[in-house]
Image (cartoon, helix red, strand yellow):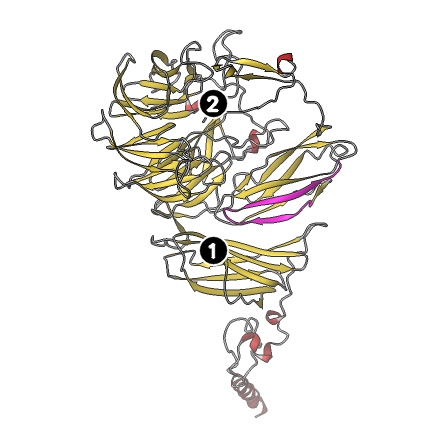
Amino acid sequence: MTRRLGPLLALLLLIWGCTQSHGEAYLPGQCSDGLDNDGDGSSDCEDQDCAGAPDCAPTASLNGCTETPAGASCLVIAELTLEPAQVRPGETFSVSVWIPHATAENVVLEIAATPIEPALELAAADGGLRGNYSANAELPLGDHLVALRADVEDGEAQAYALLSVTEQQSCDDGLVREAGICVPSHSGVAIAPDRMFHTPYAGQITGLPEGGKERMMLHPRRVFAVENALVSCLTDSVAIIDPEAMFPIATDASPFDPRPPPLMERAEGVLDPDGLALCDDLALDAEAEIAVTMTRGALGQPAGLTSWRLPDLTSPPFDDPIELQSWIDASGFETGVFDDGYLYVAGKPDRLSVFTVNEQGAFTLVHEQQLPGCTGSWSVIKAGDRLYLTDAGVHPERGDGQPQGGSLYVFDASDPAAPMLQSSVPTWGLGKSLAVSSDGRVALAGGEAGLEIFDVSMIDAPVLSEHIDTPGSAISVAWSDGYLLLSDWNSMRLYDASEPGNTRLISATDLALTQLSGAEQDPQWAIDNSGFVALNGTDFIITEMDTIFLGTLQPGARTGSLNVIDRRWSISASSERQDQAFVLRLRNGGRQALELSIRQQNGLTPSGQRYLIAPGQQQALELQARGLLDNPALRFVTLDAEDPMQPERRAALVVLEGGLATGDPIPSFRLPFTNRCEGELCSQEVNCFHLDDSQWEGMPILLAFYSSW
């Protein structure tokens, strides 16, 4: 009997146990599964049964300042998320903020530079502070900066993002709209150069014996990609370059190695030093194998046009181009373009001239028209039955509030031999370059005035639709599909121009590549003086003072992009005055906030400081160098940035021991000069000014420098 009760008792105990209610923390994981496991109306950490469970242990408060170097202020980089990041006007968007810090005061959330009202409230979450905000996008088309700033002990918390307001459709997750289409988002480089051709100052013309003609500045003015070659004007020559022989840019190469050779070979036809010696622009008729160089004349030399016979461009090695004939013009020509078998050139100072050029390179003037009010004709471009020409003169006679730059002239070119002027519109800038879209818009690079875009759909009434103030000087512009590429003196700027009235910056870069670093005083290979740009689909050509870059746009780039404006500082020091303050100006050309820090080094304050630069914004870093002469290692400021093109950047400190002070005598120097006047006669012959010549003693000195792009 006893043996029968044993199994029965065990069964009764098991049934009784299954009917009993266990606490929320009875099994592992029940305090974090989101369920009310014991049926008492409370779940997870809200249930008192979970008190003391590992999942419900208090979250440790965060301190984003724990790694702040001594002497530097705290920077807490917060998280700021937009949902969605692209909206139509009036649509709802939300902002989610998380600060990885336990405390924060004076919290400000700004949208398009306007603080939200009421102020953003933060609550403790995940060891930091979290807040949310929603609103309707009552904003004009374009990118609008969303910024979070808050005070923390010994520093500040920051976060930035761009809200894009557009009439275009949004894209699926993982895709972003760019140039009118949806492309995958990535964290790489937007403007990716892969080859370069270096054209430095060279003592002799390539191939000439020693003692031959001295070279001029080999500045590439314009470059055409034809067949399997590049055809370029290099100031005093027409050069044919093999792209496959260009110097490769390997972005993963080690710093300082390799470097481009000092002289890179090319086929070359040199302009006549006793005739039209300069090339200010180049036009090319690939089908006729004819090129024409234009010059406005300089230093007393004649001006006009020179025709060239191009070699076979299908395969290298290429023969030299052959000079054919010249057309001498008293005032000269600035730029030109071939189209429909005609050569259209901007004649100085106020003309549109139309030529034909035969197989022997002979010029025939078939049409010429003066431009009313023009004082400096410059850039000409033809698209279909329209022709556009700029006046790069200054017009202070225009009324207050009116553009006092040049003009854009619009021609009907349905008769290609005789374009007829239909209208003109004043421009804020001095138009040095034009580009045309496929939907009736014209982009103008206007120098210091930046980028201007005109709606020219009505030929007799062009209208300025956008004016974008760029940080540099807009030199050249190219348009392909929805992309617009602009050279802006010390940076290249890529825009999404697919939506009229909403041209958005995608990326700006100075193309810094440390594997091409030079001597100490030139610490970065980066754009100093940008020139010509061309864009065909996503393939680009970019010229700098002495370099031609080839590469491809990479759609979808969204990371920050560091542009170092002050790459070199010259500082005068003496044994008594070794401490100097200076400023480094930096700009973020990307679409995301850019984190960077000053690398720690002795003698530099604040060494190790971290910064966060908002998209498209500029920041000035105030630094102090101590013991410049006693600390020879202090010759560079090294920056570490989250820039995929170049995470390490340097600015050089050129230390001049001694230097000049007010009242010191000027060292002797010599300079070339023209326009030496005696009475009412002024000669354009080049003379030489020597400071110590007795004829100049006691006379004032005016030094005027002129450069031409």
- Answer with mark 2 or mark 1, whichever residue precedes in sequence: 1
Left or right, 462 with respect to 236, comes to left
Q: Residue at x 47, y 23 (%)?
A: 219
- Is residue 625 rendered magenta in the image? yes
* Mark seen at residue 574: none
Report the magenta residues as a range. 606-627
Tag 2: amino acid: His
Depth check, mark 2 against mark 1: the one in front is 1
Disc 1 target residue: 112
Q: Quadrant of residue 190?
A: top left
Residue 534 in sight here? no
| Count of number-bearing discs | 2
Residue 579 position in % (x across, y down): 74, 38
Tag 1: amino acid: Ala
Disc 2 target residue: 219
Q: Helix, strand, or loop for circle 1?
A: loop
- Is residue 113 rendered magenta in the image? no
Residue 507 position in % (x across, y down): 46, 42
Residue 674 position in % (x across, y down): 51, 16
Q: Residue at x 70, y 27 (%)?
A: 660
